[in-house]
Image (spheres, rainbow, N blue to C red):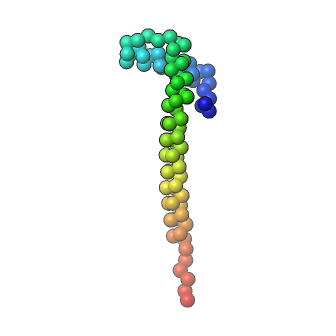
Amino acid sequence: MFIKLTKDQQQLMISDIQEFFLHERDEEISEFAAERFLFFIKESLAPHFYNAAVLDAKHVLEQQYSALEEEILTLERPINK
């Protein structure tokens, strides 16, 4: 997977996963189990969120380009014949 995490980021996420399971499911999971769950999320789910973010960025850029194009067209001068 193309997502690179620092050791600190990964450790924080593993702790968050363990805390989630404890509070939401009353289940203590090991660091290894939380790491495997994080791997599953990175490999299976993260690409969906990433692609959605790319599409969102594309739409924002298209809107900004359209607005810029309209602004440029207002600079045109009439031609007298």
Task: Name the foreground residue: 32 vs 75.
Answer: 32
Which image quadrant for residue 69?
Answer: bottom right
Q: Residue at x 50, y 36 (%)?
A: 48
Residue 79 placement (x, y as % from top left): 55, 83
Farthest-out residue, bottom: 81
Quarter containing the N terminus: top right
Counting every numbered tag in the picture gives 0
Which residue is at a point 54% across and 18% down the rendered structure image?
35
**Residue 14 visible somewhere in the drawing:** no
Quadrant of the image for the C terminus? bottom right
In percent of width and height, residue 65 lies at 54, 58
Percent x, y of residue 76: 55, 74
Please tell me which residue lies in front, 76 or 14.
Answer: 14
Q: Is residue 2 above or below residue 40?
A: below
Residue at 55% in and 23% down: 39
Image coords of residue 5 (percent x, y): 60, 26
Tell me if residue 1 can be seen.
yes
Residue at 53% over, 52% down: 61
